[in-house]
Image: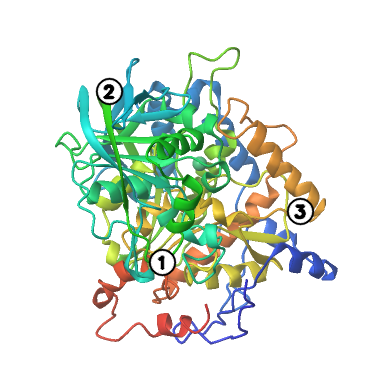
Amino acid sequence: MSEPRRHHPTDPIEGAILASPEISDGRTLLLNRLIVMIVCTAAVVAGCVQEPSSGQQPLADTSFDETRLLDHVRVLASDEFEGRGLASAGEEKTIDYIVSRFIEYGLQPGFGDSYVQDVPLIRTQTRPGAKLVVRTRVEQTSLGYGSEVVFWTRRAEEAIELAGSELVFAGYGVVAPEYGWDDYAGLDARGKTVVVLINDPGLATQDPALFNGRNMTYYGRWTYKFEEAARQGASAALIIHQTEPAAYGWEVVSNTWTRPQYDLDRGDGNVSRLAVEGWITRAAAAMVLQAAGKDLDSLSEQAAQKGFRPIPLGVDVDVTLNNAVDKMVSRNVGAVIPGATRPDESILLSAHWDHLGIDPGLEGDRIYNGAKDNATGVAALLELARVAAGRERPLARSLFFASFTAEESQLLGSLYFAENSPLPLATMVGVLNIDIMNVWGPTRDVQVKGHGSSQLENYLADAARSQDRRLVADPFAEKGYYYRSDHFSIARFGVPGLLAGSGTDYTEHGNIWGRERDTDYVSNRYHKPSDEIDPAWDLSGAMLDMDLYLQVALRLAGGNGFPQWADGNQFKAVRDQTAASRMHQGSPDLSGQRDAQVLP
Ligand SMILES: [Zn+2]
């Protein structure tokens, strides 16, 4: 990672110092351990943040309340809320709870005269007996459903039949004009089944100039592979599973995709989706390719080279799939503090309320309480809403607080919100998303997912400086976490999005201890019924992170800058299409241009 340039421009509008982002990797951070950190001043912990421009006046008239924060988590993560599954009794209670708090704190309804937005969903479930057969000229093989291949459809169709669909190896399945890359070049994919690699060529080649090196781009995500194959007109796509580039093992794949799948109900039977989406194990893919006279390793090498062209395999695929289809309606919750002078310019703060509900098939504890994921995030959102609404001085811009549904189902609630936004996205300044808060006390570092994405990080770095904390990059950027929470749904429409929170360098216990905590959570609690409140929790670190988001939100809402995507970022082109909307009284967005000098 390159060292950021030192540059401290003065924001012309706010008269504040906009600091350079202080990003370092773990090693630099360890070397810098000698720096004395004064993190936990009582004022900061109590949430009485200092106005960066004046250094004196508090930004907020009210303080965060740690007891209230934990109380929210207790309610939302209680067994009574049933794991906050979609369209369940638990959803009913969750929505009621969040709406009641927004009303209590004096926020306005976010969707016209309502605090909720209906999100129409379809749920599909592959029925037993699904078959995928691969045929060469001399033999045919039925792949084991669950053990060698999993597949499903998100179309609202009871039965899917594919017969004689030609199999084509399409590399990484990527069309990326900014990298001069087209894995579908010269291929008419209509009616065909493409087989593609997971992740992107940057990980394979470790070339930082290619797809951001090890840091995953959206082109590496499985969701993208299916979307692109559908755009190309293919009937089916199979992703070759590999544990490291996928970031999870085959058991996760087979567990996840043999369960019900959700999609937005687009009212047309969702025919724009592929007829069949699926994953195939590396071993099964190698076997199929061998039957076609090809070698997976050498094809993978070719696929990582610029100029790769798709390779027809002379193999046909037949699929028989019976599908259970249900329709349902879930809900996003939203409330707003309208801006006094420029209400159409908004800052979105978000935290998904949904989790995995109840699994009747489990032994013992069957409730996925989702205490950290994401009862803590919703609790933080509610506290942010209360403190922001308690301010006496009005803000120029609107603060919108959204709690999305179906985040755990491919970010569908936030996608629906973005497609049906109550606020113009062209003048939405940024999204500050919260997904899983720190429960183990203050840290010296603030970890940024997708580091280097946008100038929102400059504001965050400035806020972190006020707490004597520093920004660090996500150490697992190849896993693509930036694409795995709700800000990403909005980012796809061009709005810069931030996902940040405590790192692992705990003020009291240090980095090794912090990493052990992370590992324990990921291995033993994440997406398991054991994600519950622990009496040993210490939410003071979460309070600091909330304070950072509050500072960033209030700075943005009080100013008129529009932070931009970093040059080369894949969402920049979409944002640039609406650049003309981001002008004030005919004057160009000066602070945004100043910001551009900061983030390399
Ligand atoms: Zn989450």
Taking depth in this image into account, of 344 and 164 the one nearest to the observer is 164
Quarter placement of the N terminus: bottom right
SS at badge 2: strand
For mark 2, does the 10 Å Cα neighbourhood hold few (<14), some (14 to 19), or many (20 or more) residues? many
Taking depth in this image into account, of 573 and 240 the one nearest to the observer is 240
From mark 2 to mark 3, how far is it between C-alphas? 50 Å
Taking depth in this image into account, of 368 and 24 the one nearest to the observer is 24
Q: Position of residue 355 (x, y in %)?
A: 47, 32
Q: On the image, numbered disc 1 is attached to which residue?
A: 306
For mark 3, does the 10 Å Cα neighbourhood hold few (<14), some (14 to 19), or many (20 or more) residues? many
Q: On the image, numbered disc 2 is attached to which residue?
A: 321
- Whether 387 is drawn above or below 1: the answer is above
Between marks 3 and 1 in the image, the one whose residue lies nearer the viewer? 1
The structure residue drawn at horizontal position 44% and vertical position 51%, both measured from the top left corner, is: 299
The structure residue drawn at horizontal position 19% and vertical position 52%, both measured from the top left corner, is: 188
> Which residue occupies the extreme left position in the image?
268
Q: On the image, numbered disc 3 is attached to which residue?
A: 506
